[in-house]
Each structure stands twice: as structure tokens, then as C-alpha cells.
């Protein structure tokens, strides 16, 4: 009975291969898949447990890299293990070995891709001022460039292993790349502008900037555009090339604010009042904790007033703080001017007439002529 059963599997064939060989290949593929998945899960749990216990960044990276293991590729590898046990012709064995390389290259590519992403994430997080990772243009371009290079190398290696002439293929890609670059040169200009923004850092996410007539807080720096949230609440989207070509005022990096303001008094002020006004303004600003006095001068004789110029430094970059300080200074100056019996000037012009023309005799003659008519 047993001999008949064994004979059945050895005598019958499928595609020229005995049933016994097919059964052996199936069992080998199944066992290989189960053992491989079990081993990877075991290692992943161990590494993940060590990472959760805080045993270093490398352990965390190892757990994340193992998480990128593809079950589909493991299944394909197990199938190839079973196929390797079949009595295949010589030409099919070469193709199976090529498939082995493709599966292995894809899996290595997935692991390397995850490792590079984690490495760049950690690098930009450590070199960011806030200590957190932000998807800046440099980070996005770096990650995108590394991934493109990685998968291009893997693709070329797989094609070369499959017997494709990659020299002609690379040459064709070069010609096609030139054509594509000419077609999308505006887009590439914005991409390289984003790289310039990332390297030179004229502004970063969170900075308040003024570009021409537009002002707002930077929300996102992308590969093609930069998005700004204006003071009115709407979002402004500008091309990176336009941003680089414009003059940018970055108020986020303002540490101190230099303020220059003027006021004018009437010509009725005496020289003693002028001296006291400048001294009082100096005293007012020096009493401000958030301001540093620079100077206050009777600057010039204006057309209709005596002009004063005052300069001081606000020690806080906040615009609201500056306005609060300026308001207190203005009110104190108004009180000081009132105490000194001086008067603020307003635009006025006085015309002095040296002489008036003498009246002519024509009106008298007209009056005499009128009387003659009535007579």
C-alpha cells in the first residue's frame, strides 16, 4: 500500500516534474516562510522591547528598519526556495537565480530606505534650533534626493542582473532628462530656489517677514512655493523663485528696535523752555524699563514750528511692546509740554503784506456819473 502510494507520486508528473518533487518544493516553501516570519517577529519584538526601555537610538532605528520587512517579498523568497528544489532545466535555474537577486535587492532597498529616512530625521532634528523636526525645504530635498539615488542604483543593479545593457539605458535616460528639464525649467527654478532658501536660510517656518507689499508669518517652505499667513488671516502662496528675487525683511530676527520720532512746538517757545523740553524727554525715556535713551535734539527751525527729533531703542522686538512704550512716552511728553506752558505746533503759514496798492479814482467817477443820470 505504501509502495503504491509512493509510486503514484513518483510516476505521475506535472510539467515534466514528478508529484513528489512538487510536494517537496511546496513543503520546503511553506516551512521556509513560517521559519523566516517567526524569526523576524521574534527579533523585532526583542529589539522593540529594548527600544521601549530606552536603550539607545540605534536600537530604535533597528526596530523601525525591521518593521519595513515586506511579507510579500518573504513569500516570494520562500517560493523561490521551493522552486530551487525542483528538477528544473538549466535555463530556468539561471532565471531563478536572477529572481533571487531581485527579491533580495528590493528588500535591502526597503530596509535602506527606512534607515536613511530615520537618519535624516534625526540629523535635522538635532541641528534644528527648536530641537524638533520640521519638514523644511532642505530636509525634503535631501530625503527626496537620497531616495531617488538609492532606488536608481537598485533598479540599475536589477536590470544589469537580468541581462539588460544598462549603458544604453543610462544614455537614454540622460537624453530624456535633458528634454524633461527644458520642459519644466520654471518648476526646476522654483526647486533650486527652495534649495537656496534651505541653505542660506533668509527665513524659516514661524518667522514674520515682509516681501514687498506682503507681510505675514511663514507657515510652510515647499519645493515650489512658500506659504505665508498674512495679518488679515488669509494664506499667501508665493513661488520660491519670486521670494529669492525680492527684498525680504525678517522681523523675527529683530532683537532691538530703533525708534525715531519727531514733534514740533510753536515759535512762541523761549530758549529756556526748549532746553527744559529736551531734558524732560530724556528723563521720560530713561524712566522706561524697556527702552534705552539715545538722543533728543532741537533739530531745526521749520517753516511754521520748532522741530525736535528723538531717538531711543526698544529692548524688546515685539511690535506691541514698542507701541506700548511709544504711547507712554507720547502721553508723558504731552504732560511735560503743558507743564512748561508750551504749545504743540500744527501746520500753518503766516503771510506778511508789506504794502497795499493805492485805491484808484475810478469808483468816484462812476458815482458822479450815476448822480448825473438821476438828475
Image (cartoon, rainbow, N blue to C red):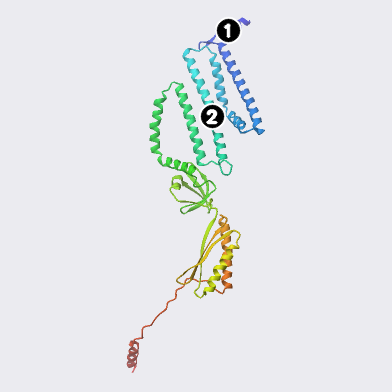
* Of marks 1 and 2, the one in the foreground: 2
Question: Is residue 23 shown left or right of residue 146?
Answer: right
Q: How many marks?
A: 2
Provide the residue designation for mark 2. 112
Per the image, label 2 sits on a secondary structure element best described as helix
**Residue nearer the viewer, 254 or 87:** 254
In the current view of this chain or complex, which residue is farthest to the bottom? 375
Residue 198 position (above or below residue 359): above
- Upstream in the sequence, badge 1 or badge 2? 1
Rendered-image quadrant of the N terminus:
top right
Outermost residue, right side: 53
Q: Position of residue 328 (x, y in %)?
A: 59, 64
Q: Is residue 349 above or below residue 116?
A: below
Quadrant position of residue 273: bottom right
The x, y position of residue 207, in whole percent, is 53, 49
- Between 205 and 331, the residue placed more toward the observer is 331
- CA–CA distance in space, label 1 to label 2: 48 Å
Identify the element where label 1 is drawn.
Answer: helix
Taking depth in this image into account, of 80 and 167 the one nearest to the observer is 167
Q: Residue at x 46, y 45 (%)?
A: 240
The answer to which image quadrant residue 359 occupies is bottom left
- Mark 1, residue position: 8
Q: Residues within 10 Å of mark 1 (few under 14, many from 20)?
A: some
Amino acid at each position: 500500500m505504501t509502495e503504491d502510494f509512493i509510486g503514484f507520486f513518483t510516476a505521475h508528473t506535472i510539467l515534466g516534474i514528478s508529484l513528489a518533487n512538487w510536494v517537496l518544493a511546496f513543503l520546503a516553501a511553506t516551512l521556509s516562510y513560517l521559519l523566516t516570519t517567526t524569526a523576524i517577529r521574534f527579533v523585532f519584538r526583542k529589539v522593540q522591547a529594548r527600544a521601549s526601555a530606552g536603550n539607545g537610538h540605534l536600537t530604535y532605528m533597528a526596530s523601525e528598519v525591521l518593521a519595513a520587512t515586506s511579507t510579500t517579498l518573504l513569500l516570494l523568497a520562500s517560493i523561490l526556495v521551493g522552486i530551487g528544489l525542483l528538477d528544473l532545466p538549466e535555463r530556468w535555474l539561471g532565471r531563478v537565480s536572477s529572481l533571487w537577486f531581485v527579491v533580495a535587492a528590493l528588500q535591502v532597498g526597503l530596509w535602506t530606505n527606512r534607515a536613511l529616512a530615520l537618519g535624516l530625521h534625526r540629523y535635522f532634528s538635532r541641528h534644528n534650533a527648536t530641537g524638533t523636526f520640521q519638514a523644511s525645504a532642505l530636509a525634503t530635498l535631501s530625503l527626496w534626493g537620497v531616495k531617488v539615488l538609492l532606488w536608481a542604483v537598485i533598479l540599475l543593479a536589477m536590470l544589469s542582473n537580468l541581462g539588460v545593457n544598462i549603458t544604453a539605458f543610462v544614455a537614454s535616460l540622460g537624453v530624456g532628462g535633458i528634454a524633461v528639464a527644458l520642459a519644466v525649467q520654471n518648476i526646476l527654478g522654483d526647486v533650486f530656489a527652495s534649495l537656496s532658501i534651505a541653505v542660506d536660510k533668509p527665513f524659516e517656518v514661524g518667522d514674520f517677514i515682509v516681501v514687498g507689499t506682503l507681510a505675514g508669518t511663514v507657515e510652510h517652505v515647499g519645493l515650489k512655493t512658500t506659504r505665508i499667513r498674512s495679518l488679515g488671516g488669509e494664506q499667501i502662496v508665493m513661488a520660491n523663485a519670486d521670494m529669492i528675487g525680492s527684498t525680504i525683511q525678517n522681523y523675527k530676527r529683530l532683537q532691538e528696535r530703533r525708534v525715531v520720532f519727531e514733534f514740533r512746538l510753536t515759535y512762541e517757545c523761549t530758549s529756556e523752555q526748549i532746553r527744559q523740553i529736551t531734558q524732560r524727554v530724556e528723563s521720560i525715556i530713561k524712566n522706561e524699563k524697556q527702552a534705552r535713551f539715545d538722543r533728543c535734539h532741537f533739530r531745526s527751525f521749520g517753516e511754521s514750528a520748532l522741530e525736535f527729533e528723538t531717538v531711543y531703542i526698544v529692548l524688546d522686538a515685539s511690535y506691541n511692546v514698542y507701541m506700548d512704550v511709544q504711547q507712554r512716552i507720547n502721553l508723558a511728553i504731552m504732560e511735560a509740554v503743558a507743564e512748561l506752558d508750551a504749545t504743540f505746533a500744527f501746520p500753518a503759514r503766516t503771510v506778511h503784506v508789506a504794502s497795499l496798492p493805492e485805491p484808484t479814482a475810478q469808483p468816484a467817477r462812476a458815482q458822479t456819473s450815476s448822480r448825473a443820470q438821476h438828475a
